Each structure stands twice: as structure tokens, then as C-alpha cells.
Image (cartoon, rainbow, N blue to C red):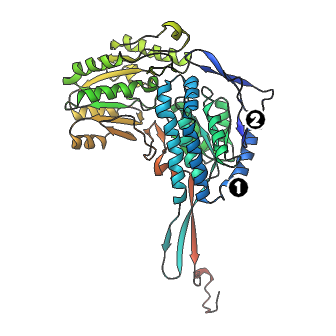
Amino acid sequence: MIQHSGFYIHGKVCEPRPRKTFTSLNPATSETVATVCQVSVEDIEDAVSSSRAGFAEWSEMPAAEKARIMQRAAVLLRARTDELAELEARDTGKPLQEALQIDIPTAADAIEYFAGLTTTLHGLHHDLGTEQFFYTRREPLGICAGIGAWNYPLQIACWKSAPALACGNTMIFKPSELTPLTAIRLAEIYTEAGLPDGVFNVVQGDGMVGQRLVRHPAISKVSFTGSVTTGQQVMIDAASYHKPVTLELGGKSPLIILDDAELDVAADTAVQANFLTQGEVCTQGSRVFVHHSLQDDFLRRVKMRTEKLVVGNPLDRKTRIGSLISERHLQKVLSYIQQARSAGAKLITGGHRVTDGLLAKGCFVAPTVFADCTDEMPQVKDEIFGPVMSVLTFTDEKEVLNRANASEYGLAAGVFTRDISHAHRMASQLQAGVCWINSWGATPVEMPFGGFKASGLGYENGLEALRQYTKVKSVYVELGRQKLSILDNGSTADR
């Protein structure tokens, strides 16, 4: 057990001193992983002062040197995959195998990708004739705040910090208080790689800490991942100070299986789309629309695959379904399962808390599949963020598109069909920021990731993310005599 964890300011973990603390629990065992210091108002001011000093050095550093430091950080992160994956599994309850194969590698990918783009940042030049031209400069914003979620703590920290740093900004990052530990490890790796002190600081605490960052006048941009409700408040607070925001929020994503789909692939993918990380994924494909002619065969395949998934100790590499993040969240998921039953949904498999042996101490729910669902059922409309799949049927393309789009969310969507032209046509009409064809969940760092409607604003990853961490300055140049009619008195004298 980690006995104590502080926060990270100006290149070091701050020394513990009497202050407010909170505990980080392993949700699979209910054991304390760490006691963590919550930052005070004075600590936040220290972090801001540190970030100002770091910005003065980092923003002036040659791009090639920035790239080398970030590349070293990616190498160090990959070298510590086993250590970081185990810490992530203990902190989140997710299966170790997932952390090893997804969380840590994709975090390193983000740093490596944006390191490679550091030297490509440039403005434009435009002639206006023989005596005038202008050029633009892409300049860093300054101090950026990153506020993370608890489902992919390290990956999110890298998705936010890597483009910010590549553009010459500094970042103060606040992880979720439920998963506070790997952000500190990332800060240590950045320092070891050569990042100047103050360029990446980590503060710990609850929502009040995040709100102070959003409202702080020295913060130039906020990037937030979390719930729709909190994201709306972040946007309101940031707007009061005219700050740009990136919001990656919730989803209730439709996965559409047409009548010509390869059914085994569709069933495999539906299980993956719903039960990866116990369903605690914003892009979870929890509304599965299946052509009515395929329903029985599809449900049979999904039931068989789901019941083979091992629910167990996250540190066991055979485990595929780990623990939900907390007892409170567990109760929320169970309440939606009960609401689905009460609304008339047919339970195909799962639907209960798992309490076998040592699992009784954790927050485990059996992966759950409902059929005979309708669009108005609570588990179909609301984001559950747990291992609950709702299967609905449809008869034609127009119908399913209308129903798929009839949601306040618009994060992700997917289409399964052998007719690729049909798939492209449907993708163009789906109201979602990310659409997959015969696949689900791939989020390569090169691809912009963001949602429509209530699912967010702005983008993580890709060139779109890079652009959102710079401001454009236009510089106009006069090579000849400036001709200002307001000063023209008919004289031909030089002005």
C-alpha cells in the first residue's frame, strides 16, 4: 500500500504537512491505496507561479529540444509499463490486462506523436502586392489547466498535456480524486526526461480545486473530461474569464447492425463496445440497434460471448471484467438495471452484483444484456457508465438513423454492413463526432476525438488538438510609404 501521496509542483512531490487529506481506495478490495493531500488556495497559487516560471523557459526553448525531451518521456513511460499498469489497475479497478495493452501504450503514443509535431508548428506568409505583406505566428496560450476523469487517468493526462506542451504551453493538471496516483508518476517521468520545473504541475483535490483552476485569471485555457453537468459548469466559469475550453463529456452511442452484417464480427464487437473497462467508457456502444431479422441469432451469439467473460480480481491477467469505480457508482448501475426490468426489458444475461469469495469486498457487476428494449426506457436514454447493453430492433435505414440521432448526446456511433457504400452514406448522417465502420473503439492519437451536441466541445488528439493550444497573431509589414488619407494635405513631402 502507498502510505502517502502529495501533489507535484516545480519538479518535485511537495512535502506532506498538516492539511486536508482524502483516501484513494482500490474499488476491487475496498483497501486504501493512498492517503492524498488536497491542495489549498495557497498551493494553487504556488502552482501558478511555478507554471509562469516554467512558461518563460519552455516557450523560448527551440522546438527540436522540446521534441527531444518529450520523446525521452515517451520512452521512459513505455519502459515502466508494468509498474504503471499495476498502479492504474489498483487505482481504477480495471483489469490489469487492459492497462497493459491499452492505457499505458496509448498514453506513450500521445506524447510521442505530439513530440513529432513540435517542429512543424508554423505560421503563414501572404503577399499583398509589391510593398506590403503579412505573416502569422502561432504562439502558445500560456498556462493551461487539464482536469481529468477517473476511467483512463494516465491516458487522459497525456492526451491533454502532450499537445499543450508541444505548443510551448505549461499545464497544471488535476486528476480525479478517485484516481489520483498515476498523474504524479507522469510528472516524475517528465522531470526525469528533462522537462523544466513548472512546465507540468499536478494538484490534487475535489471539484472545488478544479473550479479554482477554471476561474483563476492566470489560466489561459481549460481542457476538461467528465460528466455533462460538470462540463456545463466548467464552460460557464471559463466564459466569465473569456477562456477557450475543450470539453470531452458523456455519450449514449448507437451501434447499428444492418441485415447484411457479418454477425460473428458484429457480436464480438458489441461485447467489446459495451464491456471494455466494465462499461466505464464514454464511447460505450450501449444502444445496439439490430435489424429485426437478425435479433435472435445476434442475441444468442452475444449471450454466449458475454457469459465467457471472467469477472474477477483486476490483477489476475485472466480477468476481463473488473470492479466499478466506487460503491456509489455501483448502486447507480444496479438501479438502472432494476429500472430496465421494471420498464419491461427482457434480461438475457447478467443483471446482478457479483459477490463470489473475495469479490464481495469490491464493486463488481456481471456484464448485463437486455433485449426487447424501447427508446424511452431509462437505461436506453441515460448514460449509465457501466456494463449494461440494451438491444433494440429496427426495420429500415431511415428509421434507425432517426432513432440513433434522437439523443442529447453525439459522441460516437458505428455501422456494421458488408456494403461499404451504404456504411459511408450512413456515417455521413449520424450525428456523432466519431463514427466507426465495421469496428468500434479505435482512437489512434492521429485521429481527432470529440463529440457533438451535449457530448462536448473541441477535440483531443490529431492536428485539431494542436491548433487548439495556440493563438494566431497577424503581423502586417509595410515596405513602402504608408498612404493615410486622413493626413493627406496635398503635400508631396515625405511622411
* Residue farthest along the bottom direction in this orientation: 492
378 relative position to 248: left or right: left
| Percent x, y of residue 110 | 51, 44
The one of 321 and 1 positioned closer to us in this rendering = 1
In the rendered image, the quadrant that contains the C terminus is bottom right
Q: Secondary structure at mark 2?
A: loop
Q: Quadrant of residue 439?
A: top left
Amino acid on which disc 2 is placed = Cys
Q: Quadrant of residue 2?
A: top right
Relative height, residue 242 to residue 179 (above, below): below
Q: Is residue 224 visible?
A: no
Distance of label 2 from label 1 (alpha carbons): 22 Å
The one of 47 and 78 positioned closer to us in this rendering = 78
Residue lying at 56% horizontally and 41% vertically, measured from the top left = 158
| Percent x, y of residue 22 | 69, 23
Which tag, 2 or 1, sits closer to the chain's start? 2
Relative height, residue 332 to residue 431 (above, below): above
Q: Residues within 10 Å of mark 2 (few under 14, many from 20)?
A: some
Residue lying at 29% horizontally and 23% vertically, measured from the top left = 392
**Which label lies toward us, 2 or 1?**
2
193 relative position to 460: left or right: right
Q: Quadrant of residue 268?
A: top left
Asked if the residue under mark 1 is in contact with the one under mark 2, i.e. CB atoms within 8 Å, the reply is no
Residue of label 1: 56
| Percent x, y of residue 351 | 40, 12
Q: Which numbered dot is residue 20?
A: none
Amino acid on which disc 1 is placed = Ala
Q: Secondary structure at mark 1?
A: helix
Q: Residues within 10 Å of mark 1 (few under 14, many from 20)?
A: some
Q: Which numbered dot is residue 14?
A: 2
